[in-house]
Image (cartoon, rainbow, N blue to C red):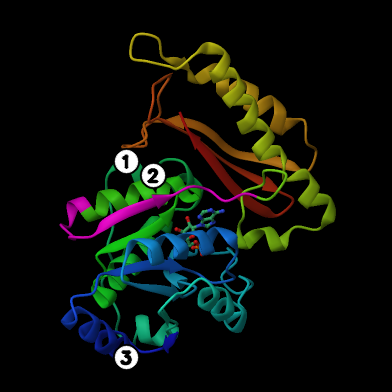
Amino acid sequence: MITATTIEEVRNVIKKWKAEGLTVGLVPTMGALHEGHASLVEAAVAGCDRAVASVFVNPTQFGEGEDLDSYPRDFARDCEVLEAKGCDMVFHPAVEEMYPDGYGTYVNLESEMTKQLCGKSRPGHFRGVCTVVSKLFNIVTPDRAYFGEKDAQQLAVIRRMVKDMNYGIEIVGCPTVREADGLARSSRNSYLNEEERAAAVVLYRSISRAKEMLAAFGAPSAEDPADAGALKAAMTEIVSSEPLARIDYIEAVDGETLLPKERLVSGDLVAMAVYIGKTRLIDNFTI
Ligand code: AMP
């Protein structure tokens, strides 16, 4: 696996690959890699001739008082995970390589979709995400880029940005990888102590309950949609029963625009953010 720390190094390798007619897949990450990230790399390796992963804790997507400084970093281990999955190149730039002195250009999706869900408690987050992903798209010029459905709002925002800005890149969404008890894998799970880790399963329990309710109703359709209020109430009751949990939001939204909806049909999204102690966890499912 090639390790590149400068944009120039990446461009030189990509130029060579493209001259050989090879397709390139990109997996953007912030490192502290786990099985979720590994599944994206697997998909990129399977779907493209060459797979590139980026490992960069992007400061512009963290807000004041968030965990930029304490975010877990272990690049040596990340390289082992990537190499084992057959990744061809990892791009691991310093902050100054991505945001040199005088940096001033940001990509901002201005429609309502970035103001919903996580956008409410993390203003500026998606501006940082869109900016860094745009830069990575320009540096790597991939044919396909792979993102996890675990970050459903991020995936919807990237799809919109790609459409709006005419990036000729196919965005591939990959299913959420979970622990044995259902907790979605996340780099932030490492913040949880033993008691919190046990409590964190409440997110998945509430999702499982909502899915059971949907299964009992039968598949929702335009004529017979699912009631968002009933699903949210059942999920809220389960999460509220866990003393260590504090709900940031449990919302039902249109899967594409992310605007709130009362009557849900196939493709709509139920998403949640819950604090377990001081750690903010997210999860979701698509109707
Ligand atoms: P991050 O390093 O948290 O920025 O995540 C990098 C990519 O991995 C994003 O596209 C995430 O959606 C994806 N990802 C994170 N956790 C999971 C998971 N449990 N299953 C699938 N994809 C994930």
**Sooner in the amino-acid sequence: mark 2 or mark 3:** 3
Return the residue at label 2: 115
Q: Which mark is residue 215?
A: none
Query: Marks 1/3: CA distance?
Result: 38 Å
Query: Marks 1/2: CA distance?
Result: 5 Å
Q: Is mark 2 within 8 Å of ligand 1?
A: no
Q: In this view, does 15 lie above or below 220?
A: below
| Label 1 crowd (10 A; few <14 / some 14-19 / many >=20) | few
Q: Considering the numbered disc 2 on the image, is that residue within a helix, a strand or a loop? A: loop
Q: Give how far across and how far down residue 14 sits, in percent.
A: 26, 82
Residue at position x 53%, y 39% from top?
A: 284
91 or 158, which lies in front? Answer: 91
Q: Is mark 1 within 8 Å of ligand 1?
A: no
Q: Considering the numbered disc 3 on the image, is that residue within a helix, a strand or a loop? A: helix
- Please tell me in which quadrant of the rendered image residue 188 appears: bottom right
Q: Give how far across and how far down residue 168 sits, in percent.
A: 17, 60
Q: Is residue 240 above or below residue 143?
A: above
What's the magenta region? 163-178
Q: In which quarter of the image is the C terminus?
A: top left
Return the residue at label 1: 112
Q: Is mark 3 within 8 Å of ligand 1?
A: no
Task: Pick out the residue farthest to the top.
Answer: 223
Q: Give how far across and how far down residue 270 sits, in percent.
A: 49, 32
Asked whether disc 2 touches disc 3, contact meaning CB atoms under 8 Å apart, the reply is no
**Residue type pointed to by label 3:** Glu
Return the residue at label 3: 9
